[in-house]
Structures are given as structure tokens and as C-alpha cells.
Amino acid sequence: METRQNIRVTQSQRLQLNLGLQAAIRLLRADAEGLTRFLEEQAAENPHLRLSPAAPEPGDWLPRWERAFAGAGLDPDLAASAGPSLMAHVTDRIAVMGLTGAELRAAQALAEALEPSGWLGRDLAAIAAEARVPAGLAEAVLRRLQGIEPAGLFARSLAECLLLQAIEAGQDDPVLRGVLGNLPLLATGDLARLARILGVPVAAVEVRLRLIRRFDPKPGAQFSALSAPLREPDLVARKRAHGWEVMLNRSALPALSVSAGRGEGRGAARALLRLVESRNNTLLRVGAEVLRRQEAALDLGLSALVPLTMAEVGQALGLHQATVSRVVAGTAVDTPRGTLWLRHLFSGRAGQADKSAAAIRALLGDLVRREPPEAPLSDEALALHLAGAGAPVARRTVAKYREALGIPPAHRRRRPQGGA
């Protein structure tokens, strides 16, 4: 028997992040406070990297930090005050649901079972047993909790998380449910086979795939692990004669420079300086584009927020959607109306309405503030008023937005004329 040895040459591709790219991604995600800590660490290791204290700039942003958009229909999730943790957010929403007894025990147990991703981390039957409630009651309470924004919280799987967001966006249909029921096959990229299984054209599967990519698989990740401390904003927006101008808040960052002369470490210091300049430039571009598209909200208030996605901003700037997401994470912008989280100026379209969901919540809050205290508006009446304002939404959507804003139902808002 004769044996032969063969030499074969094959090619393969793989993506490997070098240290420079890793540092660039870290800087894109860092807010001013995080970037300052990172630069201080680097300066302690590299003697050629010089940091100078930030030059204080006159401004009155701090008093507005806590009263952002006060009296102008503020959506609580928009204000860049102390960012709530996921548990604090969920607990606040449960408190306005009017749950008592066994329902309240079930809701509290479900909230405690939430993972940082926003998904349930334990089996529903085990949670029901721990709360000493029937499994059917726990299931009913879970359905109510799944109405808490952002959509996708309290999901038991990735498919359910995405389905909840599709329902919220008014995009639920049998084809989408079929795609979500075959996520492992979808992950392989074999759309033709998936289309044959569902009995639909491949184009229909592609449409649902593009929709799914717009959803957030971990809606709980947008909340702080702990409440965020008050800090200076990263950007400042001011109205000038020629329009709105967006600037970096230089008082929130130390001045960075490289020492003169030669020596080991100067190359790394210069590379870091270029990375910081690139980060600042990208942050400024993204912030300016977002605020340019939301100028009406800066002039008129939150009720003028228009639907806006990160993909749209990325396309306009020639950036990937993931880059935009990293830039706006934790970034705050100071405006004459208040200090806001830049991420929360993105808001999807609410159903068939032309307005964004955030704008409709602002209109809803304004309607409740102006209603007669002795005759508060029901959810159905609020829906009719919103439709008259060009924001047609279903009554159940009004109820969900009302609960998200912490507004009790009409019977609990009723006050006698002249009463407290």
C-alpha cells in the first residue's frame, strides 16, 4: 500500500480587532466622565501624555439638568437627570398599575427575575411558585408587564422579545411570526429554505429580516446598572442668529497634549491624541445631525419630535448604524430647554401616525395637564383628542403611554372643583 503526502493551500477570512480598533471603539462609547478617567489612566502610564485641567466655561446647565423640559410635556425617559436603573424603571411602572394582593406579589417576583438584558431569567412556573400564586395568574400579570416600555421587556426568549417590539410598532403579521419561529434557520442565512417552509416569496422574508434588524434584542441594556450621577453634558446646543449651533463641552474634558522631545511612548501618545480627536469629531457630527433633524423639538418642545432612527443618521453621515449607537450611548446634550440624553431623541413612528412615539407621549401629558380636574379625560377621550391633533392611536396605546408617563387612570385623577 502506497501512501502519499499532499500539500494544500487554502484561504480563510476572520475579523480580529487590533488594539487600536479596540481603543477606538472604547472611546466612541465613553462619555466625558469615562473618557477623562481613561485619559488619566493612560497619562499615569505614559509620561509623554500631558493632561491639563479643563477650562471652566460659563453656563447654567446644572440647574436645568433636573428640570429638563419642565412644564413642557416631558417624557420622564428623555430627561438626562439621574438615569434610572432597570429595576427602578420597572418598579415605578408597576406602582401605577393598581395591582394588589396576589397580582402585586407576582409582579414583584417577575421584576426581581429580570436579567440586565430585560429578559426573564427564570422559568415562569418557578417564579409563580415562589410568589405563591397560580401559574395562570402569573401569566396574566406577565402579559401586563410586557406592556411596559421599552417594548421587549419581560420577554422569555429572543423571539418573544422581537415579537413584542413588532406588535408595538404595528408590524406583527403571520409571516413575521413564522420568521421568528425559525430564528435558528434565519441565522444560517438560508432565506430561500425559510421562504419555502413558510410558503411565501423570498422577498417577503427579506422584508421581515430588515424589520427585525431594527429591533433591540436587549432592551434592558439601555438602563444604568445603578442610577447615574449628575454630571456635565458632553455637548452644548445654542440658538444663534443663523440657527442652532452644536459644540463640544470643553469644560467637561481635560486638555490633551504630547510632550516635546524624543523617547519611548511618544508614538503611542500621539496615536491616542488622534483617537480622541477622531472621537470628538464623530461625536460632534452625530450630535449636530440629530439636533438638526430635531430642531422643531428644540424650538417647540417634545411634542414636535419627529420619527428618527440611528440608521437614518448613519446613512446621512456615512457611518455604520452600530457606530451611531456607540456614539450616542450615555451622551448628554445641554439645550436652553434642558439637558437631554441624545439617545432618547431617537423615536420610532407610532403605528400609522406621522408623529413619533415620544411626541405622542408629550401631547398626551399636555392634554392631561390641561384637562378639567373635576372631569378628567378617559383613555378613549384622550385618543380622540390625539387623533384631532394628527396623532391617531388606539385606546390601548393611550393607556400604555399613560402608564409609561406615570399618569393614573381618569377615575384616580378626578378632583372636586376647587379641591386640592
Image: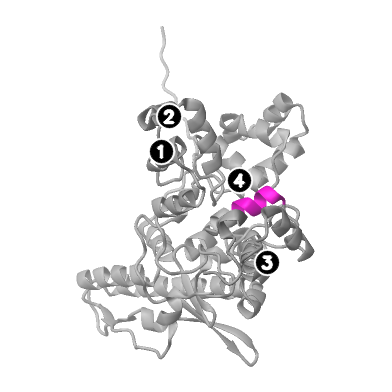
Q: Badge 1: few (under 14), some or many (20 or more) residues near its Cα, within 10 Å? A: some
- Mark 2 lies on residue: 133
Q: Secondary structure at mark 1?
A: helix
Q: Badge 3: few (under 14), some or many (20 or more) residues near its Cα, within 10 Å? A: many
Contact check, label 2 and label 1, Cβ < 8 Å:
yes
- Mark 1 lies on residue: 105
Q: Badge 4: few (under 14), some or many (20 or more) residues near its Cα, within 10 Å? A: many
Answer whether residue 412 is visible to the viewer in this image: yes
Which marked residue is nearer to the observer: mark 2 or mark 3? 2
Q: Is residue 73 left or right of residue 10?
A: right
Which circle marks residue 3 in the picture? none
- 404 or 214, which is in the foreground? 404
Q: Is residue 51 magenta?
A: no
Mark 4 and mark 2 lie on one chain; the one further toward the N terminus is: 2
Q: Secondary structure at mark 2?
A: loop
Q: Residue furthest top?
A: 1
Which circle marks residue 165 in the picture? 4
Residue kind at label 4, given as amino acid type = Gln
Prevailing secondary structure of the magenta residues = helix
Alpha carbon separation for disc pair 3 and 4: 19 Å
The quarter of the picture where residue 125 lies is top left
Alpha carbon separation for disc pair 2 and 3: 43 Å
Read off the magenta span: 394-401
- Mark 3 lies on residue: 306
Residue 227, position as x, y percentages in the image = 36, 61
Image quadrant where one finds the N terminus: top left
